[in-house]
Image: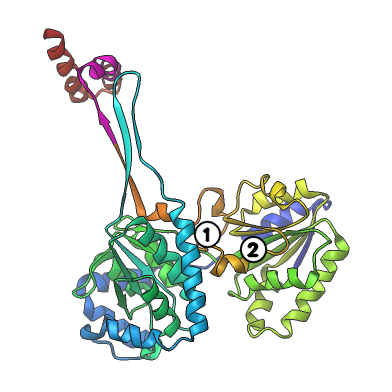
Amino acid sequence: MKRLDTRSDEFTQTLQALLANRGQETNSVIEPVREILSAVRQTGDKALCDYTTRFDRFALTAETIRVSKDEIAQSAAQISPETKAALELAAQRIKAFHKAQMPGEVDYTDDAGLRLGMRWTSLDAVGLYVPGGKAAYPSSVLMNALPARVAGVKRVAMCVPTPDNVLNPLVMAAAQLCEVDEVYRIGGAQAVGALAFGTETVAPVDRIVGPGNAFVAEAKRQVFGHVGIDNIAGPSEVVIVADGHNDPHLVALDLLAQAEHDELAQSVLITTDNDFADKVAEAVENSLKTLKRSAIARKSWEHHGAIILVRNEDEAAEIVNIIAPEHLEVMVDEARAFSQKVRHAGAIFMGRFCPEALGDYIGGPNHVLPTSRTARFASGLSVFDFLKRTTSIETSEEGLKAVGPAAVILAHEEGLEAHALSLSERLKSLSKE
């Protein structure tokens, strides 16, 4: 863990090094992913079965690529009533927040007499990738499928790896709750290829969303353009701005909640209180002794974690905007006022009782957020990722007379004769009437 102080002459250089010293190395997977995608495109189901046998250790056939509704129901039935109720509450809150995002249409007639409009339509089909293997992520199903459903997407297909052919009951329950239309027991770059290009069993989709490992991320990068994607996600990160009135133990747990994701995750504390910083660092060390994922969390904290001492809250906000974190916790007296100074953050959690983990599961806003400083120009997943805008222009003869001549001039200036004629000839015919 690094200690930085804005009073140091080397602060700017050290901060830049901290931000640069992480990220997934993708060069090594570019060619393997290209080969996998090519195989899926050429041989379809056969490639899916071959790669699944190789990577997930069971013999997949074309007939068993799709998980049947009975299998989903039987697996989902294994979860406890308490877990089912928690999933239902999370789904209810996530759905409500995303319904509130739905935009209205634009329709007005301007001073020149042109009727201008913009309407929203949903995508036809979306593919959802859900990680499998070491951990189960039912929350990922909810966060990706429900906005699509709210937006009106007609077909939602889900791919999830099932190592050793074992379905995860939590993931199946979440898929059932979200009314996912199709579930396929395939993962990795081959699943992305199937969703993008289609196979004999898997129909192609229009957009692929959901997190995955380096192979999945690279596969999404390579199919982008043929289909849409949500983003290329990097390692998770949190910045916590906290004053000395907080409980060091709770702040330490919030830092470790990100660190336990993986070794490349980044947790940063920004504070004006040096004594508090020391107490948080000590609390992190104490908590690492008991965490189940302590090996992962420790590597993340030691290699990418940081505590930054600042002079005041204005300076803290300035540093937050430089880091542009995926998650920002604001634990100061006037948390909302501080957040107004923040221009770049994927999601903001305000107050001493609002840890980022609340947003991961049940807060309502989406937990699929921009990482690796992309919050400078990108936003979290929303209904807008599953909607398209279509604009319209409707004009009468008078409207064309009012604005057409200017368009003719611009077309001539650009050297596009047919453009100019398509307008000028109509104007000429109107002048004869």
Q: Is residue 154 above or below residue 391?
A: below
Q: How many marks?
A: 2
Q: Horizontal and vertical percent for residue 185?
A: 33, 81
Provide the residue designation for mark 2. Answer: 238
In this orientation, which residue lies closer to the viewer: 70 or 225? 70
Q: Amino acid at mark 2?
A: Val
The N terminus appears in which quarter of the rendering? bottom right
Look at the image and tell me whether residue 381 can be seen: no
Say what secondary structure mark 1 lies in: loop
Q: Amino acid at mark 1?
A: Pro
Disc assigned to residue 264: none
Q: Quadrant of residue 147?
A: bottom left
Look at the image and tell me whether residue 292 can be seen: yes
Q: Is residue 419 above or below residue 180?
A: above
In this orientation, which residue lies closer to the viewer: 259 or 354? 354
Horizontally, residue 180 falls left or right of residue 171, namely left
Provide the residue designation for mark 1. Answer: 365
Q: Quadrant of residue 116?
A: top left
- Magenta residue span: 392-407
